[in-house]
């Protein structure tokens, strides 16, 4: 689909269990935009989903730990890919907003806040 960008990301716990998802952004994300975003992500790829308003994926793995976080859980999600949106993506992912809004949300982050994650309590134990 022209004029849409898919942002794919994942949550991987310390035991290497993974949950994948993505959101669709209205507009074209340029290489310059991606570079700017990755400069704001921790180590170029890690972010707190709750802080930028994309769906958190960590709770999908709680099915393996009696419905709650465990010692393998943490707050960080991983940016995987920015790419043009396909028709399959339209059926699979939801429209999050615009590329401009996504970039603006990321640029407001001065420090990544792990306390926003539902895994924060597990991380303290």
Image: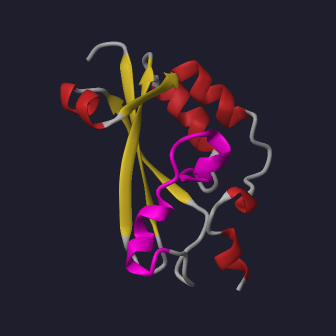
Which image quadrant: the C terminus?
bottom right
Residue drawn at x 62%, y 69% as measured from the top left: 119
Residue 124 placement (x, y as % from top left): 73, 80
Magenta-drawn stretch contains 122: no
Measured along the vertical axis of the image, is residue 27 above or below residue 91?
Answer: above
**Could you say which is closer to the camera, residue 36 or residue 47?**
47
Residue drawn at x 23%, y 27% as measured from the top left: 86
Magenta-drawn stretch contains 58: yes
Q: Is residue 106 left or right of residue 90?
A: right
Q: Quadrant of residue 39?
A: top right
Measured along the vertical axis of the image, is residue 17 above or below residue 103?
Answer: below
Residue 12 placement (x, y as % from top left): 44, 67
Q: Residue furthest front?
A: 67
Write down the region rendered in magenta: 44-67
* Display colour scheme: secondary structure
Q: Residue furthest left?
A: 88
Q: Is residue 66 left or right of residue 52?
A: left
**Could you say which is closer to the camera, residue 94 or residue 80?**
94
Q: How many marks?
A: 0
**Could you say which is closer to the camera, residue 80 or residue 35?**
80
Which image quadrant: the N terminus?
top left
Residue drawn at x 37%, y 66% as measured from the top left: 18
Residue drawn at x 51%, y 23% as measured from the top left: 97
Q: Residue furthest right?
A: 110
Residue 82 placement (x, y as % from top left): 40, 36
Measured along the vertical axis of the image, is residue 74 above or below residue 21?
Answer: below
């Amino acid at each position: 689909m022209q004029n849409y960008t898919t942002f794919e990301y994942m949550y991987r716990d310390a035991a290497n269990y993974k949950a994948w998802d993505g959101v669709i952004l209205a507009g074209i994300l340029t290489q310059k935009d991606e570079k700017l975003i990755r400069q704001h992500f921790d180590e170029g790829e890690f972010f707190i989903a709750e802080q930028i308003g994309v769906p958190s994926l960590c709770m999908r793995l709680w099915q393996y730990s009696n419905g709650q976080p465990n010692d393998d859980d943490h707050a960080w999600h991983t940016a995987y890919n920015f790419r043009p949106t396909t028709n399959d993506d339209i059926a699979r992912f939801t429209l999050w907003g615009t590329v401009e809004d996504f970039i603006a949300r990321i640029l407001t982050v001065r420090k990544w806040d792990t306390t926003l994650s539902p895994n924060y309590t597990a991380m303290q134990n």
